[in-house]
């Protein structure tokens, strides 16, 4: 299985490649990709340097252009595809059907990967994207159980990449409008969920409050560690109880599932986190490289090294990890 | 004159409630009715045969019937249910996922797309038109400015693809494999005791300052405020919107339909307030603002 790591900057890209990533994915400095953060991502020059570095070390580079352009943005998104192709990326990660068609017609030689934002959760959906846009690979949303992933993989007409580690999206990606309901930006429109511009922290008599466009997302008592106010991970009230009504602030970690993912025929595991620092990327990439190497060594039985989980937990939201929807009971 | 449609019932109601609702709806001034379960495969109060029975009654009453499909397809069983819908030839199908697009096009079945299908530009509309698209819904997070551009671009291409706008009801905002209603009751999803039946208009989720944020509805999450574009109808008509969608609620729906019907006929002023069931109104998306916002005083008669 291929290890696909995030790169939000050139140092992060180098950290990923130096620590064992088989491929890195990056985006341009605008809302054409789903991790639009201030100070993050690549201009053409930096992207060119990154691609050259990765290629010199035998790693591939994917470019994410995985938001949905509206009429005003169409030319910008189209030109992002042209720029990615001209820079020599190995694949473009796309979600919008209009853009997929454009890329397939204009740059047929550049592989197309279906982004997780394309919301394909069945092999019939994958066939649609394969038949119409000849995609090479698809990234599955983080909502399927391991048995469901197996079912998709059995009949999939394309390579599959699944999320292995990082922030956990609990909603089917590409069809979640919660962020634009509270703020005016969503992953689909602006490449942003719970955007930083709308976040406000406030120390009050009742505790530290995190707000998103003035909406109270969470309030932390003394000794509680506060997390970024991603709106689905806040504490809310339902019928008089206050709890994490949608999802706890935890990270996805599928180390334990590696043998099964390999046996199912998954082609690549993906690490989330283009917003993360180079040292985070280095630690995560190194850990997953070791795990994949042990898996591939074919030694009888794959045992997760407790040190790996310790490293990954230390890098996780709230220090907690879960295998999420892969485990049916999580649902 | 613009058409009025009744969207699919997004909530889980008992079989009898559903039959009663549509028996009444057959008499209402709506042109199109979307039928079927779009949220959760565990909601099996009605089988396809039941839906088809309702469909034939509505058809006899002069309604156009469209069969809606599940939004999040997860299992082989989900695909089997979808294949049944996409292998009938009597009704148009509303594709809410690419799985449905694939099965409809494979069977040469004409289809329309629901608001969860990501159509953000005319390139997407053009390619779907080649596959048999007969009409489309604007994604809920998009507003009038984008819609106006899309309609203009379609016109320039000579494409006749009627546009539908979700104009009244709690907005469907997200779908998950997790069931939030079962989670609320500390029940596993596979043994949820069908608690959604007890919440025919969802579970209210509020901030700790009692602000109504969302409605939990099984595996789907809806807006906490009710989207209401009634006052925008004259503008929609000028823009060339074909159909205005009203999302079913178990109380007061007939009155909602009548108000929208009067409005499209120009019989009541656009400032007439419509507040039937307790929930704050919103219309932010239409104005390119946060969906929960309420913009007042901008609509023109």
Image (cartoon, coloured by chain):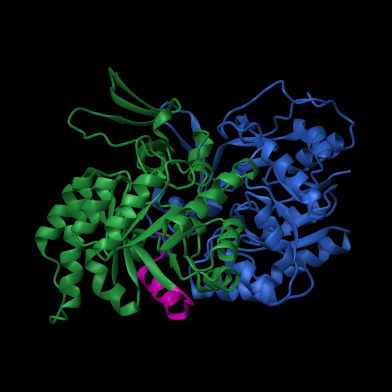
* Residue drawn at the location 70% of the way across and 33% of the way down: B276
Picture quarter with the N terminus of chain B: top right
**What hue represents chain B?**
blue
Q: Position of residue A72 (x, y in %)?
A: 63, 40
**What hue represents chain A?**
green
Q: Position of residue A5 (x, y in %)?
A: 29, 57
Foreground: A87 or B74? A87
Which contiguous range is marked in magenta? Answer: A142-158
* Residue drawn at the location 42% of the way across and 26% of the way down: B209
Foreground: A102 or B293? A102
Is B73 in the magenta?
no
Foreground: A253 or B15? A253
Residue B253 visible: yes
Is residue A288 left or right of A153 when viewed as pictured? left
Picture quarter with the C terminus of chain B: top right
Is residue A20 left or right of A118 when viewed as pictured? left
* Rendered view: A292 above or below B170: below
* Rendered view: B34 above or below B263: below
* Residue drawn at the location 50% of the way across and 75% of the way down: B76
Q: Position of residue B47 (x, y in %)?
A: 64, 70
* Rendered view: A190 above or below A135: above
Foreground: A155 or B69? A155
- Which corner quadrant of the image does residue B274 belong to? top right
Residue B44 visible: no
């Amino acid at each position: 299985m291929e290890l696909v790591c995030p790169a939000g900057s050139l140092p992060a890209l180098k950290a990923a490649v130096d620590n064992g990533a088989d491929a890195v994915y990056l985006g341009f400095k605008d809302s054409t990709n789903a991790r639009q953060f201030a100070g993050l991502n690549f201009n053409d020059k930096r992207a060119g340097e990154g691609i050259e570095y990765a290629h010199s070390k035998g790693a591939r580079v994917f470019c994410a252009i995985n938001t949905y352009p509206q009429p005003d943005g169409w030319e910008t998104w189209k030109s992002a595809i042209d720029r990615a192709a001209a820079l020599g990326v190995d694949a473009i990660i796309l979600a919008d059907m209009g853009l997929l068609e454009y890329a397939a017609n204009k740059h047929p030689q550049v592989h197309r990967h279906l982004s997780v934002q394309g919301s394909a959760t069945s092999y019939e959906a994958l066939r649609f994207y394969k038949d119409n846009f000849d995609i090479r690979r698809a990234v599955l949303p983080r909502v399927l159980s391991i048995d469901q992933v197996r079912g998709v993989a059995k009949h999939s007409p394309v390579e599959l990449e699944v999320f292995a580690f990082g922030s956990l999206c609990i909603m089917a990606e590409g069809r979640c409008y919660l962020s634009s309901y509270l703020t005016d930006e969503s992953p689909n429109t602006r490449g942003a969920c719970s955007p930083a511009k709308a976040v406000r922290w406030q120390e009050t008599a009742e505790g530290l409050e995190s707000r998103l466009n003035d909406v109270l997302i969470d309030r932390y008592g003394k000794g509680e560690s506060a997390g970024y106010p991603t709106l689905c991970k806040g504490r809310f009230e339902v019928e008089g109880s206050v709890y994490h009504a949608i999802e706890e602030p935890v990270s996805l970690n599928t180390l334990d599932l590696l043998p099964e993912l390999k046996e199912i025929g998954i082609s690549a595991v993906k690490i989330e986190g283009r917003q993360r620092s180079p040292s985070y990327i280095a630690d995560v990439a190194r850990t997953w490289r070791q795990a994949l190497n042990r898996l591939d060594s074919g030694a009888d039985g794959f045992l997760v090294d407790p040190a790996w989980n310790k490293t990954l937990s230390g890098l996780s939201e709230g220090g907690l990890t879960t295998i999420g929807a892969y485990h049916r009971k999580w649902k | 004159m613009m058409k009025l449609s009744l969207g699919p019932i997004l909530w889980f109601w008992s079989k009898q409630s559903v039959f009663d609702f549509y028996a009444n709806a057959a008499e209402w001034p709506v042109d199109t009715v979307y039928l079927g379960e779009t949220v959760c495969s565990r909601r099996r109060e009605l089988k396809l045969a039941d839906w088809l029975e309702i469909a034939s009654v509505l058809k006899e009453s002069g309604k156009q019937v469209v069969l809606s499909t599940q939004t999040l397809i997860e299992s082989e069983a989900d695909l089997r249910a979808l294949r049944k819908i996409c292998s009938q030839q009597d009704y148009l199908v509303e594709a809410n996922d690419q799985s449905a697009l694939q099965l409809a096009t494979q069977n040469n079945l004409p289809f329309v797309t629901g608001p969860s299908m990501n159509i953000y530009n005319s390139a997407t509309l053009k390619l779907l038109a080649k596959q048999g698209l007969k009409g489309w819904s604007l994604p809920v997070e998009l507003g009038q400015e984008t819609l106006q551009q899309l309609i203009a671009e379609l016109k320039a291409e000579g494409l006749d693809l009627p546009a539908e706008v979700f104009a009244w009801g709690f907005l469907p905002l997200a779908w998950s494999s997790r069931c939030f209603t079962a989670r609320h009751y500390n029940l596993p999803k596979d043994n949820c005791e069908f608690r959604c039946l007890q919440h025919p208009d969802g579970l209210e989720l509020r901030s700790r300052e009692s602000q109504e944020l969302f409605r939990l509805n099984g595996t789907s999450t809806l807006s906490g405020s009710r989207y209401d574009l009634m006052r925008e109808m004259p503008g929609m008509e000028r823009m060339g919107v074909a159909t205005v969608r009203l999302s079913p609620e178990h109380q007061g729906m007939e009155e909602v339909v009548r108000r929208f019907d009067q409005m499209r006929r120009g019989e009541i002023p656009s400032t007439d307030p419509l507040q039937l069931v307790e929930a704050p109104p919103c219309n932010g998306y239409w104005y390119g603002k946060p969906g929960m916002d309420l913009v007042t005083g901008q609509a023109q008669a």
